[in-house]
Image: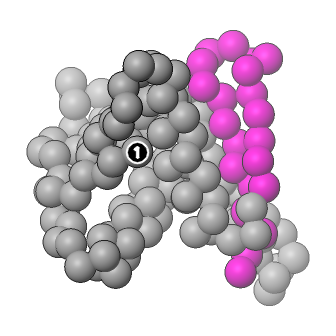
């Protein structure tokens, strides 16, 4: 259990910055997933159920102006910063574990680069999908 602070800036506007704190990295990653699910509900208010896959979630993370985590390290009594790529890796581990516990297969396709900008994106959708 490492206290984790999630720093979010949805757009270029600095006044939109916000943060949330969690008792663990896993709780923080679940919070990122909930943030995306809330976004989907706002975008699809009349849909009784919404399905998404992890590639769509990772694209959402990439489209945020900034998203990072500060994770407390007891050994140094400091907070270690982590970027979007680290967050996506941790979300992937969390979703894979949840899929395995539910008896579903969760396959990951390799990361690629979009438009030569060096931005890592999912080049092929994953087999795990999630219903709200």
Left-right relation of 36 to 78: left
- Which residue lies under the disc numbered 1? 132
Dot 1: element = loop
Residue at 21% from the left image edge and 67% from the top image edge: 106
Residue at 49% from the left image edge and 38% from the top image edge: 36
Left-right relation of 106 to 88: left
**Placement of 63 over or under 93, stated as above or below:** above
Q: Nearer the viewer, residue 17 or 131?
A: 131
Q: Residue furthest right?
A: 77
Query: Where does residue 54 sit, x and y in percent of width and height?
Result: 30, 49
Q: Let me know if residue 6 is in the magenta part.
A: yes
- Image: magenta residue range: 1-21
**Placement of 92 over or under 72, stated as above or below:** above
Residue at 30% from the left image edge and 41% from the top image edge: 52
Q: Residue furthest front?
A: 48
Res 66 quadrant in image: top right
């Amino acid at each position: 259990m490492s206290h984790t602070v999630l720093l979010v800036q949805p757009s270029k506007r600095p006044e939109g910055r916000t943060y949330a704190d969690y008792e663990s990295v896993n709780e923080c990653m679940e919070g990122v997933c909930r943030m995306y699910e809330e976004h989907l509900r706002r975008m699809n208010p009349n849909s009784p159920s919404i399905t998404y896959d992890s590639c769509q979630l990772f694209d959402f993370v990439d489209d945020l102006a900034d998203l990072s985590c500060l994770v407390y390290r007891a050994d140094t009594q400091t907070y270690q910063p982590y970027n979007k790529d680290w967050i996506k890796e941790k979300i992937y581990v969390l979703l894979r574990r949840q899929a395995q516990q539910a008896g579903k297969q969760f396959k990951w396709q390799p990361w690629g680069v979009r438009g030569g900008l060096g931005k890592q994106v999912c080049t092929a959708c994953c087999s795990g999908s999630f219903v709200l």
